[in-house]
Amino acid sequence: MQDQENKLRSKRKRTKVTQFPEIPNKLYFSIGETAKLCAIKPYVIRFWEQVFPMLIPAKLRCGRRYYCKAEILLIRNIRTLLYDQGFTIEGACLQLNKNKGSLLVQDVTENNDCEINSPYRQQLSVFDCGNNNTAKEELLNEVITRISDIISLLEAKPEADTV
């Protein structure tokens, strides 16, 4: 187990602990504000959105990204795993899976500070990495089953009333 975890860490030893600024009391933050709060560049956040499926910002029609407090805490957690603790991207994914995101993210979502509580959003932010799409396939199969049930109800002929 320890040997496998060491393989998921990069070769460089890291002991640095980043001090992040306090998150202001706002509902949403732009990608620039989020980058400053997480001490990284905006392009890094955009890349992490592709690699970490649990990181799903709200997007406007024009494509602008907005992040809530829970997502900022998740980004900080990812940054700490990658930069401070020296995990590889795969190792960070596995670590997030083991911790189910982070206790910090759960604290924020329990306080309803973010729309990440919506059932649709929770189902989209499945904590899996790589080619493990079983949870997404299960969700898709459930949707297909429900749609089929609705179609069969609509196609069923109502029985004539006997008077």
Image: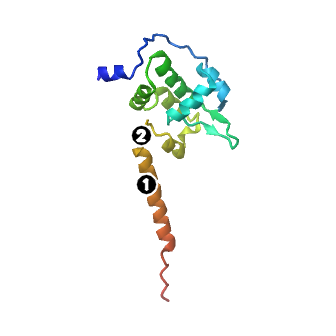
- Image position of 93 with respect to 116: above or below: above
Q: Quick one: 74 or 160, which is closer to the camera?
A: 74
- Image position of 162 with respect to 10: above or below: below
Q: Residue at x 41, y 29 (%)?
A: 99
Amino acid under disc 1: Asn
What residue is disc 1 on? 141
Whether residue 55 is visible to the viewer of this picture, yes or no, is yes
Left or right, residue 107 beside residue 2: right
**What is the CA distance from the residue labelled 2 to the residue labelled 1?**
18 Å
Q: Are marks 2 and 1 in contact (CB under 8 Å)?
A: no
User: Looking at the image, is mark 2 or mark 1 earlier in the sequence?
Assistant: 2
What residue is disc 2 on? 131
* Relative image position of residue 86 (x, y in whole percent): 44, 17
Amino acid under disc 2: Asn
Whether residue 25 is visible to the viewer of this picture, yes or no, is no
Residue 31 appears in which quarter of the rendering? top right
Q: Quick one: 33 or 89, which is closer to the camera?
A: 89
* Relative image position of residue 146 (x, y in whole percent): 46, 60
